Each structure stands twice: as C-alpha cells, then as structure tokens.
Amino acid sequence: MAAKKTSPKRTNLLLVEADVLVRFVLAEYLRVCDIMVIEAVRADDAKAVLVAGPEIHILLSDAQLAGEGSGFVLVQWVRRHRPAIETILTGSLASKAQAVSEIAARVPECIPHGDAAQLIAKLNAMLAERKRRLRQQPKSAPIRRRRQRAS
C-alpha cells in the first residue's frame, strides 16, 4: 500500500498596513510564494479577523496604524490572546521589505520577484509616482449652485 503524500501546510499571514500601495505590493510579493495573505487597515480590523477568521500563523503589522490602537498595542493583544501566532512589527519601508523577503525565503519552492532591495525600490517608485500625480491634479473650482427661478 502506498503512503499518502501530505502537502505542506500553507502559511496564513495577516498583513496590517494602512497605506494601500504598500499593502498591495507586500501582499502580492507573498502571494507569489503561495502564502495566503489577509489584509487589514486598522488594529480593530485585524482583531476581528483573528477572532472570527481562519487560523493565522504570522501577523505582520506596521507600528503606526490608522485609527485607534497602534501596531504595538495590536502585537501585545495577539501575544496575550493568540500566543501561537508569530508577530512581526515593522516601521520603515526597508524593514517591511526585509520582513516580507525573509518570510518568502521560508517557502523552499518560492521564487519571488526580486529581493528586499528590489522590493524597496519598487515601493519607493510607486509612492513617488503617487505623490507626483497628487501634485499634478488641478485644484477644482468651487461648485456654483444654479439659482432657482421662482414660478
């Protein structure tokens, strides 16, 4: 009788990042490695996922989050209520790229698109382009209301 092959357990990661561009790039980098990424913007959103969602193996959070509660507070909550979850707290783009690169390196068959330095360069380019486009947007003229005619 042939033994059943067991497939390696898929890693589930909760990514908590307020900046949509940064979150998108980091999540896509990890998804190439067949890591299931669940995205959250705020600490409250992350807690809701942790309470009701699928099993999470890694929490990767920005230290400064939008809304109430910082990444530090979130990590403390996770360590108290979900101690089996590995927590990674980041601040700069470089630390985020490095953390994601190290997580991807744990998956033996993963070949991500570039290393941490290339990921940082991509993030910086995208953020610079967003900033440039925001500066170029014309300031809109005030909206004038039409006068209604009395009948």
Image (spheres, rainbow, N blue to C red):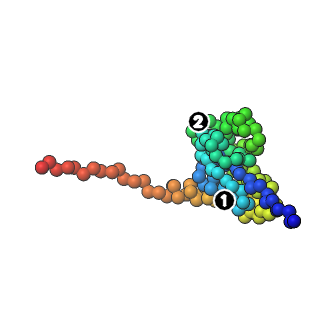
Outermost residue, right direction?
A: 1
- x and y, in percent, of residue 149 in the image: 16, 50
Q: Residue 52 or 15: which is nearer the viewer?
A: 52
- x and y, in percent, of residue 17 in the image: 63, 47
Q: Callout 1: helix, strand or loop?
A: helix
Q: Is residue 6 above or below residue 56?
A: below
* Residue kind at label 2, given as amino acid type: Glu
- x and y, in percent, of residue 138 in the image: 44, 57
Q: Residue at x 64, y 37 (%)?
A: 70
Q: Callout 2: helix, strand or loop?
A: loop
149 with respect to 1 (left or right): left
Pointer 1: what residue? Answer: 28
Pointer 2: what residue? Answer: 68
- x and y, in percent, of residue 43 in the image: 62, 40
- Mark 2 packing: few (<14 Cα in 10 Å), some, or many (20+)? few
Where is residue 62, by image quadrant?
top right
Q: Residue 116 or 111: which is nearer the viewer?
A: 111
Residue 10 can be seen, yes or no: yes
Outermost residue, front direction?
A: 1
In primary-sequence order, the first of circles 2 and 1 is 1
